[in-house]
Image (cartoon, helix red, strand yellow):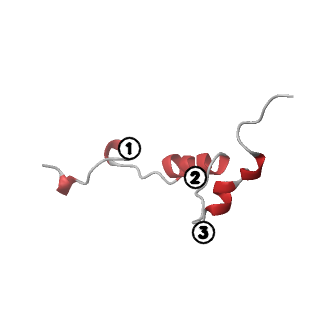
Amino acid sequence: MGKVHGSLARAGKVKGQTPKVPKGEKKKKFMTGRPKKRLQYNKRFINAQVGMGGKRAQPNRQPAGKLG
């Protein structure tokens, strides 16, 4: 049998010394996986606004008043 580094009497010393902090409230996780893809699809193709010339509006396009 091999030797143990340090005394087993001190095992868990640091964990025992640290103060217990109560867990905070978690905020709601946003969708991932299939539901996220569904939302993305609906946003891009189903509810897409058709702009001038029958083209779909670009997602990061600035309004005309903000340019320049």
Residue 31: image x %, image y %?
61, 54
- Residue in front for this viewpoint, 15 or 39: 15
Select label 1 or label 2 by which is in front: 2
Residue carrying label 2: 39
Residue sitting at x 12%, y 49%: 68
Residue carrying label 1: 54
Residue 44: image x %, image y %?
49, 47
Judged from the image, the secondary structure of the residue bearing numbered disc 1 is helix
Image: 26 above or below 31: below
Say which label, 3 or 1, has the lower sequence index.
3
Q: Residues within 10 Å of mark 2 (few under 14, many from 20)?
A: few
Image: 42 above or below 24: above
Residue carrying label 3: 21
Label for residue 63?
Answer: none
Residue 13: image x %, image y %?
68, 55
Say which label, 1 or 2, has the lower sequence index.
2
Q: Residue 20 occupies which quadrant of the picture?
A: bottom right
- Residue in front for this viewpoint, 19 or 57: 19
In the rendered view, does 44 fall on the left or right side of 64?
Answer: right
Q: Which quadrant holds the N terminus?
A: top right
Image: 1 above or below 10: above
Labels 2 and 3 touching (C-beta < 8 A): no
Judged from the image, the secondary structure of the residue bearing numbered disc 2 is helix
